[in-house]
Amino acid sequence: MTQPDDRRRRVEDACAELILTGEPVTFDAVADRAALGRATLYRNPELRAVVEEHRAHGREAHTLSGLAGEIAHLRTAVETLAATVRRHEEELRRLRKLKSPRR
């Protein structure tokens, strides 16, 4: 695992732990749990985005509108995935038909 990947994983893990324990996701708390400097989190755009995303979800996680938004997002993701599976199944049928020997 490369250093940037390791840092991102540590930040993701720290954010998840904070949310699970009901603690606020702050740059100080994430930096402490991830064993990184707070300045590193602020200066690295990818790490900063991870923390900010978890902060937003952490605040919304326990509200009805937050849950409704998450359900809508998941429903859209499942519908998109189902459409992709259907498209792949159709393609497989077409390829099998082309491959089968003609008698």
Image (spheres, helix red, strand yellow):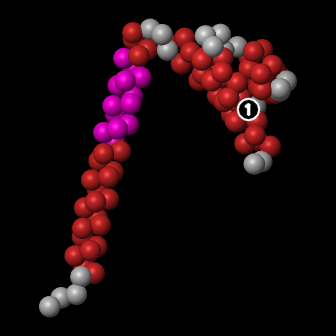
Quarter-of-image position of residue 17: top right
In the image, what residue occupies the spot 34% across and 42% down? 80
Relative to residue 36, is residue 2 depicted above or below? below
Residue 77 on the magenta span:
yes
Residue type, mark 1 in image:
Arg
Q: Is residue 60 magenta?
A: no
Residue displayed at 29% across by 66% down:
92
Q: Is 58 placed left or right of 46 in the picture?
A: left
Residue 49 at least partly seen: no
The spot of residue 13 in percent (x, y) is: 68, 29
Q: Is residue 99 above or below residue 77?
A: below
The x and y percentages for residue 50 are: 64, 28
Q: Which residues are magenta?
A: 68-80
Residue furthest out toward the bottom: 103
Label 1 SS: helix
Q: Residue furthest left?
A: 103
| Residue at which label 1 appears | 10
The picture quadrant where one finds residue 22 is top right
Q: Which quadrant is the C terminus positioned in?
A: bottom left
Magenta portion: prevailing SS class: helix
Q: Are there few (<14), some (14-19), or many (20+) residues within 10 Å of tag 1?
A: some
Residue visible at 70% across and 24% down in the picture: 14
Residue found at x 41% / y 16%: 67
